[in-house]
Image: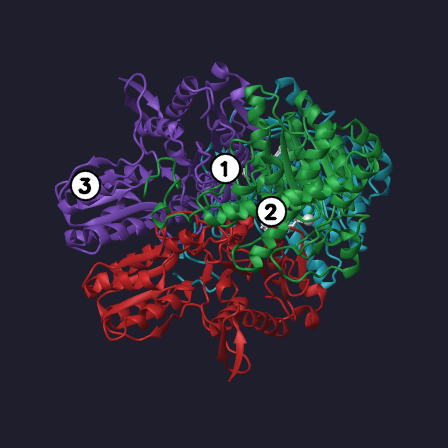
Chain colours: A red, B cyan, C purple, D green
């Protein structure tokens, strides 16, 4: 085994896929100089040259539209959106065009575009650099969405996304960029649509997305001996691995979904809807969502902390649900 | 860098254009016109539904421009795409079937009037979003350059669309990277109910390209040979790797903005543009009769033939079946997955 | 009583509020000529002149940004987005700015902007003219969202929205524009956050939003004698009148949410989440969502019909739930 | 319509500017510089967190421009707003408290570095979105015209932002409606790691305004009096109801793009711009000593006074409390509703 950071895993996935298929290229702001602001495109220029690593002006609408047209003309773009908040400049190409062309054209065109965007709060970057839009894209027919939370998944899911013939939004998390993990040598992929049982348990199922996987695992650890917590990281939000989630709830009888984006109409609501619809009889208690506050993300640390689920507050929420 | 070509002498150009090409262009122009007139009838009869934006009056632009293109070149369009689609793809049957929501339509009935696509002939779609095709055109041109081919892309849009931000972003990028894309602005002087004077701070739109060091030209959009020549030069430049051009074609739409909603424009103005002096088809016919390329009888015969082809297209569409409800989820995703 | 159309109600609401407060103005594409493409701004030019009825170039991002700045400088803009699909050109000003300025500025600025946008399918206008984004805006802290489904509400909710100091998205439905209803003379408002019990019943609660109110009522009528259906129109999506919904579910024990936008992560999921969290014990059966397909909206009539809940399919869904 | 003013003789202007105003400008410039240096120290020490974009090197632009404005005029800014905020609002204490996330900060600690607002002084915010302030500036100018006041709005942005589509949309509208807004582009020659040559198809940005019939000027952004004079003229035009102006100030940012991340620019280039020949503060001081407005001792004293004020601001912030967690939902909505 060797050690790799989450950021390096992203670079590695891109380099491997670009070596495998010369239709793959990367486009985005500052990606070409020194591996990008967050070093997520290191090594590409050296291996593949400027042609395949395209730094753009600050024109998100145009370069996301470019990705749509390039895909229609047979290429396989990887688009880097520096912060997912900036995708709001490009919602027309992304939602009106990219998500719909396959369908609208009666299947003539495929849309193999991967959008890499980092999301999430926790670094005091305030309301316009901390959002998470997985719920929006889950509500947008035509998009797949994944949220890698480990180094292994960062590489494996991204490679699957690049090989997929559909638009896939890969939501990365900058808090994890410098996380190091032991990983295998060589290549691997993680299939889109397969959840990971991050920890087994029998009293309650915690479905935790993105960075909340980590906090949920910490909470589970803190509860050891008192409550036996199963932690499931869906990894892919669309398509969602209901089989794994239902099997877990079937065992524990209790469901708590933890995510960072705002609670109202978040993906927690969708997971609850489906568990209730498909596994009502499994439930020993009302399934709940414990998620980000229904506020913009505040700058000040005291408030930012209060706006997001934390290990301690997850522990409290679990205790409440199991009556411990 | 910039250049301005206003209404060159079409007669001079006409002499250089081979007869078959003139025949092709006239036939296409008549087909586009008759197609739209038929669409209007079917719309009023309830056989076509939805939002229908007719191209009547602007045929010289689509036809003149697409006559410069190969099948492997690309074009994008907007909410008024019938003319561009026909001129690039020229499949009356499948275009009409699409309008009528049939499985045999270009987009299998999923797209309708605003979303006709044809991959084989490089037609990258109409678009329901004003300026929605701009980024797509940039991407197609990028792909050609990436692959090292000499394909070009024509991006059709109108005066209203020119005020969308993405046009500015895309021109900057096209200029920076010398992409083989032609920005073809059909200035038909109005956007829905808003005239150019109320939407745009300059009378001409093409000179904006100067802000991006993109060569530009203004031409008479109702003179098909002027369009053909101007776009032809731009296409040649693009194929030589010299990058983008902006062309503004001055023209006029003869039907209301959408469907059969009331038109606010002065009756005399409409009448003028429908007159032989302005109408692009009548003008081209007069030119071709005048220089003896065709006889009036030949032209008359062409009209009758087109009439039949259009009738055939309607017949084709009517006989085709509607998509089956259980195919609703087809192509949401490439693998046709259901959830 | 007099008769009024849904479209005329919208004009009337705007005229009344503009007479009441000269900081109110209307801005949008084609609004100034002949009362707009859909005749939703008729009468304004005659009464208040061009200054207060501002037709714009096709530049959604700029004029939505203009609304933010004008509100910060003390005005009260009403923004017309011709189809809600076009708001995708303006998501930065709307979501990054409008929704957040009150919060980010520590409350120095208020944001009294009303966005009027028509949404929904059913008129064969295909994938880019048929979307509904209420779920997205429900997930966006800072926004209120309402969906008037009657002539009375079209006027009453819009007037409340214009008077509100927050950004309010009023989602209108073009299928209803020519609906005529008997309404009172003079002024009225409908408060944001108050649901309407459109029909009383005791076997099942149908929560139906926007145009689905009408289809749910028709289904309820068709089921008369067999199933007693209560139909609730929330009218406002944010804030949501949980009290009325819970009281109903407490009575019927069964909940079916019907909406037109795609099922996955739609507002139905959010309503289920809250009912489950706050009224689990009321439930005699798993609460469900019956909503639009998870596809772009197709053009062809056979497919468009299949993509949306219809009276007959609602009837079927209700029967399934009550075992009838 | 367009005009171009390159580096006028600042000496000539200097003679016309009253001494108090020169004092004010110098004091502000030094304050902005010291403020940023202190922010950098506090950031390295972990007392300030988040994304911090320092304004060091560009002080002449914010100060020269804001010296033309009244308190009831408006300004918008972007991700690098400290300088604009200070020059418009000049409240060191509450600006520093905001940087440090305190309840006494301009935005009650909710906004931080990129989201400082001051309603009383017309500062409509920094902005985390590149070009996010452009539409807001348009709206503020619209409001002034709507109310019939002679207020003006200055929209600060940089070269990178100029390629966002909204800039084009807003210029078109500002020109059409003659809005009193000044587009002030600080061309510091780079956007994050991307140089102007790689982002922008033209060497100068201001001439793009010609596409919108907006008068424009290019000035030396490191010469505060040049900025003052150029912006002053534009402000006067706007107040007279003559509409919008585009001004490009050529300048240079002396610190890395954000926080303390590595800078890719050549060391010699940085050194040149830090030298007395280029640095805007040193240049202004030399000018003022040269023409005997101030003695070196007076300037030295001013530096010491500013130093104390900055120390006081840090002290003020440190003593202020952090927002209480239970106030999280404040101002999500006007009524402070919780859900
Ligand atoms: C982004 C967007 N905004 C608004 C509309 C509504 N709309 C459809 S066509 C049109 C006018 C377009 O005018 P122009 O670009 O001049 O095209 P023309 O109709 O003249 O062909 C408008 C406003 C739209 N479809 N998309
Ligand atoms: C819409 C958007 N895209 C990208 C970014 C990330 N970003 C922040 S600052 C910056 C560079 C901005 O350059 P410029 O406009 O020249 O401003 P400067 O840093 O020179 O002041 C970028 C790309 C952003 N904040 N917003
Ligand atoms: Mg037009
Ligand atoms: Mg810059």
Residue closest to the eye, D112 or B202:
D112
Q: Where is residue B138 in the image (x, y as percent from the top left)?
A: 66, 51
Residue matched to label 2 = D130
Quadrant (top left/top right/bottom left/bottom right) for the C terminus of chain D? top left
Q: In what element is the residue under mark 2?
A: loop
**Does residue B245 show up?**
yes
Q: Where is residue C305 in the image (x, y as percent from the top left)?
A: 37, 46
Q: In what element is the residue under mark 3?
A: strand
Residue closest to the eye, B215 or D300:
D300
Residue positioned 26% across, 40% down in the render: C241
Mark 1 C-beta closer than 8 Å to ligand 1: no
Viewer-nearest of discs 2 and 1: 2
Residue B292 higher or lower than B140, as above or below? above
Residue closest to the eye, B39 or C67:
C67
Mark 2 C-beta closer than 8 Å to ligand 2: yes
Q: Quadrant of ligand 3?
A: top right
Residue matched to label 3 = C230
Residue A89 higher or lower than A54, as above or below? above
Give me the chain letter of mark 2.
D
**Does residue B250 show up?**
no
Q: Are marks 1 and 3 on the same chain?
A: no
Viewer-nearest of discs 1 and 3: 3
The reply, left or right, for residue C113 in relation to residue B140 is: left
Give me the chain letter of mark 3.
C
Q: Label 2 to label 3, Cα distance in Å?
A: 49 Å
Residue matched to label 1 = B51
Residue positioned 22% across, 61% down in the render: A320
Q: Position of residue A131 (x, y in %)?
A: 46, 53
């Amino acid at each position: 085994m060797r050690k790799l950071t989450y950021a390096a895993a992203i670079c590695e996935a891109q380099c491997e896929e670009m070596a495998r298929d010369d239709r793959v290229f990367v486009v985005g702001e500052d990606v070409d100089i020194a591996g990008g602001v967050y070093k997520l495109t290191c090594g590409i220029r050296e291996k593949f040259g400027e042609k395949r690593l395209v730094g753009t002006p600050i024109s998100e609408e145009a370069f996301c539209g470019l990705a749509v047209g390039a895909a229609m003309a047979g290429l396989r773009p990887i688009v880097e959106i520096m912060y997912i908040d900036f995708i709001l400049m490009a919602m027309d190409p992304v939602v009106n065009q990219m998500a719909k062309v396959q369908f609208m054209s009666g299947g003539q065109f495929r849309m193999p575009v991967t959008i890499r965007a980092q999301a999430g709060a926790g670094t005091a970057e305030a309301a316009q650099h901390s959002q998470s839009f997985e719920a929006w894209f889950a509500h947008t027919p035509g998009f797949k969405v994944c949220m890698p939370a480990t180094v292994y998944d960062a590489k494996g899911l991204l490679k699957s996304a690049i090989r997929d013939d559909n638009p896939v939004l890969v939501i990365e998390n900058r808090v994890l960029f410098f996380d190091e993990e032991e990983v295998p040598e060589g290549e691997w992929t993680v299939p889109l649509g397969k959840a990971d049982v991050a920890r087994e348990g029998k009293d309650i199922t915690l479905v935790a997305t993105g960075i909340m996987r980590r906090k949920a695992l910490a909470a589970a650890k803190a509860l050891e001996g008192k409550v036996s917590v199963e932690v499931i990281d869906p990894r892919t939000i669309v398509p969602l691995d209901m089989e794994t989630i239902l099997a877990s709830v079937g065992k524990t009888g209790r469901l708590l979904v933890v995510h960072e984006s705002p609670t109202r109409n978040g993906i927690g609501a969708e997971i609850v809807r489906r568990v209730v619809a498909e596994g009502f009889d499994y439930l020993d208690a009302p399934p709940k969502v414990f998620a980000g506050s229904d506020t913009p993300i505040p700058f000040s640390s005291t408030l930012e902390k209060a706006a997001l689920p934390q290990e301690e507050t997850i522990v409290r929420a679990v205790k409440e649900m199991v009556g411990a | 860098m910039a250049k301005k070509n206003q209404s060159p002498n079409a007669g001079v150009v006409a002499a250089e254009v081979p007869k078959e090409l003139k025949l092709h262009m006239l036939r296409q122009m008549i087909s586009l016109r008759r197609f739209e007139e038929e669409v209007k009838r079917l719309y009023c009869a309830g056989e076509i539904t939805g939002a229908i934006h007719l191209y009547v009056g602007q045929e010289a632009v689509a036809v003149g421009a697409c006559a410069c293109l190969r099948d492997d070149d690309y074009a994008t369009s907007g909410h008024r795409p019938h003319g561009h689609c026909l001129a690039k793809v020229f499949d009356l049957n499948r275009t009409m079937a699409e309008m009528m929501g049939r499985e045999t339509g270009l987009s299998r009935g999923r797209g309708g009037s605003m979303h006709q696509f044809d991959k084989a002939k490089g037609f990258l779609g109409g678009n329901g979003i004003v300026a929605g095709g701009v980024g797509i055109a940039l991407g197609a041109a990028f792909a050609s350059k990436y692959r090292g081919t000499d394909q070009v892309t024509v991006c059709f849009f109108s005066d209203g669309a020119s005020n969308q931000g993405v046009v500015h972003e895309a021109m900057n990028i096209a200029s920076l990277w010398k992409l083989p894309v032609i920005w073809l602005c059909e200035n038909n002087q109005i956007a829905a109910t808003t005239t150019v004077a109320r939407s745009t701070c300059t009378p001409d739109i093409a000179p904006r390209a100067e802000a991006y060091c993109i060569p530009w030209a203004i031409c008479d959009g109702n003179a098909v040979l002027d369009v053909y020549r101007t776009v032809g030069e731009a296409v040649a430049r693009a194929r030589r790797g010299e990058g983008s051009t902006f062309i503004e074609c001055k023209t006029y739409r003869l039907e209301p903005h959408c469907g059969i909603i009331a038109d606010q424009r002065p009756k005399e103005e409409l009448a003028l543009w429908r007159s032989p002096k302005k109408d692009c088809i009548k003008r081209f016919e007069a030119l071709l009769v005048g220089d003896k390329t065709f006889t009036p009888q030949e032209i008359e015969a062409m009209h009758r033939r087109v009439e039949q082809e259009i009738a055939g297209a309607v017949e084709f569409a009517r006989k085709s079946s509607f998509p089956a409800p259980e195919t609703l989820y087809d192509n949401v995703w490439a693998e046709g997955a259901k959830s």
